[in-house]
Image (cartoon, rainbow, N blue to C red):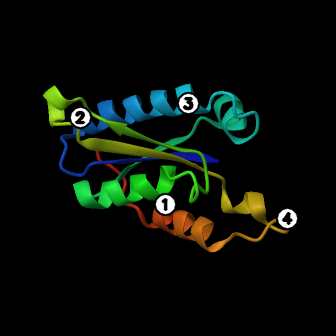
Amino acid sequence: MKLYVFVHSHLSSAQKAVQAVHVAVEFMRRHHNNRDAVTKWARFEQTVILVEGGNSQQLSLLGQTAVHPMQRVFPAEVFYEDADTLNSMMTAVAVLVPDIDDYSGVYELNQKERLVHEACAGASLVRV
């Protein structure tokens, strides 16, 4: 299980790192009561993968899909910078994604879960 953090591609390396921390803290604040996936990740794995999230439109689409209550596939969170700093821009999206092997022989991935796995697998790592 890994926490994939998609950050806005037009930020500097330092800004990407800061925004990743912001969204990870917000993710844990909102999901700390999840006794299954989030607790398992926080206690035993703690792997964070920082990846390019694209421009504002691409990141917004990912964020809307990831946190929409009726579409949520895995635990997810978005982070918006404040109005004075970056004009309330969405800067990061965090999605906790189980390893594909976690499903092997137990559960068939649905279409949205497969799409999330494919997006994570094909994402470009952030260079810091």
Along the line of sight, the residue nearer the viewer: 61 or 104: 61
How far across and how far down the image is residue 9, in percent? 24, 52
Q: Which mark is residue 30?
A: 3
Q: Which mark is residue 97?
A: none
The relative height of residue 124 versus residue 105 in the rendered view (above or below) is: above
**Mark 3 vs 2: CB contact within 8 A:** no
Q: Which kind of residue does numbered mark 3 sit on?
A: Arg
| Residue at mark 1 to residue at mark 2: CA–CA distance | 21 Å
* Mark closer to the chain start, 1 or 4: 4
| Residue at mark 3 to residue at mark 2: CA–CA distance | 22 Å
**Mark 2 vs 4: CB contact within 8 A:** no
* Mark closer to the chain start, 2 or 4: 2
Q: Which residue is mark 1?
A: 120
The quarter of the displayed image where residue 90 is located: top left
- The residue lying at 44 percent from left, 67 percent from top is 122
Residue 55 visible in the picture: no
**Mark 4 vs 3: CB contact within 8 A:** no
**Mark 1 vs 4: CB contact within 8 A:** no
Q: Which residue is mark 2?
A: 15
- The residue lying at 58 percent from left, 57 percent from top is 70
| Residue at mark 3 to residue at mark 1: CA–CA distance | 22 Å
Q: Is residue 85 left or right of residue 94?
A: left
Task: Bin the neighbour count of mark 2 within 10 Å (Cα to Cα): few under 14, some 14-19, many 20 and up.
Answer: some
Q: Which kind of residue does numbered mark 1 sit on?
A: Cys
The relative height of residue 62 versus residue 45 in the rendered view (above or below) is: below
* Mark closer to the chain start, 1 or 2: 2
* Mark closer to the chain start, 3 or 1: 3
How far across and how far down the image is residue 81, in percent? 26, 33
Looking at the rendered structure, the secondary structure element under dot 2 is helix
Along the line of sight, the residue nearer the viewer: 1 or 55: 55
